Structures are given as structure tokens and as C-alpha cells.
Amino acid sequence: MSERYDIAIIGSGAAGLSASLIAKIRNKSFIIFGDKDLTGHLKKAPRIENYLGFPPGSGRELLGHFRDHIEAMDINITEERISNVFKMDDYFEVLGMDNTYEAKSVIVATGVEYTAPIKGEEEFVGKGVGYCTTCDGPLYKGKTVVVVSYLKEGEAEANFINEIAKNVYYVPLYEEEYNLDKGIKIIKDNPLEITGDKRVNKIILKNSSIETDGVFVLKNAIPMAELVPGLEVLNGHIKADINMKTSLEGCFAAGDCVGLPYQDIKAAGQGNVAALSAINYLNSKNE
């Protein structure tokens, strides 16, 4: 049986890190999933002037302060991509690439995916389009699969599905050296459209097309409705109240994933509130 945490925090941006600080201070058992390099977009910010307590400086400088703070609090980030979160009777099952975790409550702080969906992607979700090879891989035994990846972590998922499928095509939308198993065909091209009838049967690229039984699209953030089935989503964002409670009991959300404005100082505050609400929820269950 998996260890059951009080709180599982999904995301290592300002919202997730802020939530982890409160969980640590309040002596709750928790796990935070994300990237040890922390949030990516701050690295690209040349100047930040609106973060209270941080004199005008670069995004990299602010990230350095984030990192120093969590290290001082002895908070470790688990680098595992989370594919699904399922609400069970009295806990949540959190599915990663390699492991399954259990938590009494969850804080979703994944941010938003700034990449526009491929034409046809949303139409064929569950009909040949997926976001996790370990979840849906068995469906493609002996079939043809295309993996479109915006991040290097997609290589591990492509290697996994390569053990099951007959043909695997990998379309990397990033520039790095690739660590892919023998037999995977690398296609350096831009995806334009996913087509099909009742199910996917082709992906059209700028300079070619591939007939396929399925397409896995691997991005930094999985669409909310796919990540947490049953979660109420409004205009692409998680619907949450002022206490960061969502439509699922025990599930809270914070940061960009709950809507505008997309600002780190707002996200940090919401992460704080989400953690306090999760703690109140846990305490109410113990009364």
C-alpha cells in the first residue's frame, strides 16, 4: 500500500511552493511534484517590479530567492510528471509516470499551458488523443503511435510506449539531444492538425503526414478536466472560491490555473490560502 500523505501539491511554481511552506510550518505530511529548477517562465522575465519585498530585479534573481527559501525549510521537490488525480471515497489517488501516491487532500497548482492546442486535439481527446502513455499505452499494443512532445521528459514516455506499440514516431518541439530507444522514428516537423472519423487516423505536419492509431501530446500542463476527472472547469480554468476550494471535496487550486491575472505574487497568496484551507479540511475530518 502506498504511503498516504496529508497533502499532495501538484506544481512547483509560486503557488505550489507557497502551499508547501504552509504545509511544512503546520507539520503536515506532504509531497510536492514539479521541477527542481522551479517555474520556467520567471527565467525569461528581464525585470520584475511588483513583487512585494523584492526590489526591482530579474526573474532569475526572484527564482533564486524561491530556491533559497525552500532549501532553508528542507522542502524537496519530487520530479515526477503527474498524469491523473482520482477522487476516491476518503482520499485521492495520484498517478505518476512510475509511481502511485495517496493523499487525503490535493492542491492543484499546475499553472496554465501557454501552448495552443493542435487543431483537432481537443475534439479527439479520449478518441485517440491522450496525454499519458503509461495510462493509455496498453490500448495501442501492436499499433502505430505518434508522440508530440514539447518537453524532454516526453522521451521517457516515448520509450515506454515503444515497448508496446508496433511503430512509434516522435515529434520533438524542442532543441536538445534525444535519448530514445532503437526503433523510434524522430520526425522534426511542426504538427498542424489531428484528423479522423470517430477516432484519430492521421496527424498532418507542415511537411508530411502520418497515418496513426493514436497521438500523445506531452506538454508542461495537462488540461484540467483530463488531469482531475470531475473537476469543474470554466473557460479553461479551474473554478475555485475565495478559499481556493474546488468542486471536489478535499481538492483545492491556486495560481494561474484558477484564472487571471497571471502573476506570481497573486499565485503565492493563493497557494498560502489553499494550504490553510486544506489544513482546515483535514482538521475537520479528525474532529
Image (spheres, grey):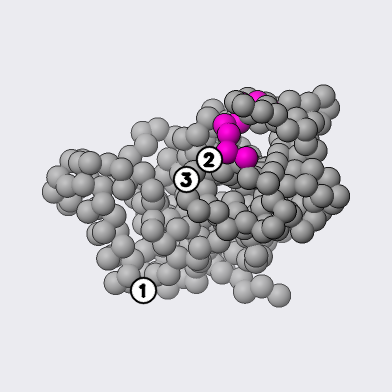
> Which residue lies at the image location 13% right of the left edge and 48% below the top edge?
55
Mark 3 — residue?
175
The N terminus lies in quadrant: bottom right
Looking at the image, is mark 2 or mark 1 earlier in the sequence?
1
* Range shown magenta: 187-194
Q: Are marks 2 and 1 in contact (CB under 8 Å)?
A: no
Which residue type carries mark 1? Asp
Choose top left, top right, bottom left or bottom right for residue 67.
bottom left
Q: Within 10 angstroms of label 2, few (less than 14), some, or many (20 or more) residues?
A: some
Mark 2, secondary structure of its residue? loop
Looking at the image, is mark 3 or mark 1 earlier in the sequence?
1
Q: Which mark is residue 283?
A: none
> Which residue lies at the image location 53% right of the left edge and 30% below the top edge?
116
Q: Residue furthest left?
A: 55
| In front of the other: 48 or 187 | 187
Residue 238, above or below 65 = above
Mark 2 — residue?
173
Choose top left, top right, bottom left or bottom right for residue 4.
bottom right
Q: Nearer the viewer, mark 2 or mark 1?
A: 2
Task: Return the x and y of residue 274 as percentages of the image width and height.
Answer: 44, 52
Mark 3, secondary structure of its residue? loop
Q: Within 10 angstroms of label 3, few (less than 14), some, or many (20 or more) residues?
A: few
Q: CA distance from mark 2 to mark 3?
A: 7 Å
> Which residue lies at the image location 73% right of the left edge and 33% below the top edge?
210
> Which residue lies at the image location 17% right of the left edge and 47% below the top edge?
57
Q: Which mark is residue 74?
A: 1
Residue 39, above or below 104 = above
Which residue type carries mark 3? Glu
